[in-house]
Amino acid sequence: MLHSDPLQPRPTLVNPSHLASAVDQLGHHASSQAEVWHLLTQNFIVDLDAVAILLPRSEPEPHWLPTRR
């Protein structure tokens, strides 16, 4: 895996198939979707909208109000 040294240029992923491959590989090493985002942005320059299309949508948990008696 690449390291995120700010003085070293990061590779750019613009091809959708290469981006999908990177997301798939990072998904095996990451424990959550947030960690996949973190690893991608630390190691590559990517189009965040393209990544959002590839990753499954995460909906927030509904917060139910307590019922009145």
Image (spheres, rainbow, N blue to C red):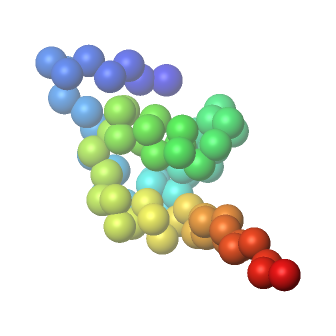
Residue for point 63% across, 35% down: 30
The answer to whether residue 25 of the structure is visible from this angle is: no
Work out whether 40 lies above or below 65: above
The answer to which of 41 and 8 lies nearer the viewer is 41
Residue 59 spot, x, y in % from top left: 61, 69
Q: Residue at x 67, y 36 (%)?
A: 31
Using the image as rendered, state which of residue 69 and residue 17 is in the foreground: 69
At 53% across and 65% down in the image, what residue appears? 54
Q: Residue at x 44, y 38 (%)?
A: 38
> Relative to 57, does residue 5 appear above or below in the rendering?
above
Can you name the residue that lies furthest to the right here?
Answer: 69
Q: Is residue 33 left or right of residue 17?
A: right
Question: Does residue 53 lie above or below 8 as drawn?
Answer: below
Q: Residue 38 or 17: which is nearer the viewer? A: 38
Front residue of 69 and 50: 69
Res. 64 image quadrant: bottom right
In this rendering, is residue 1 above or below 50?
Answer: above
Q: Quadrant of the C terminus?
A: bottom right
Could you say where residue 63 lies in the image, as x and y percent from the top left? 67, 68
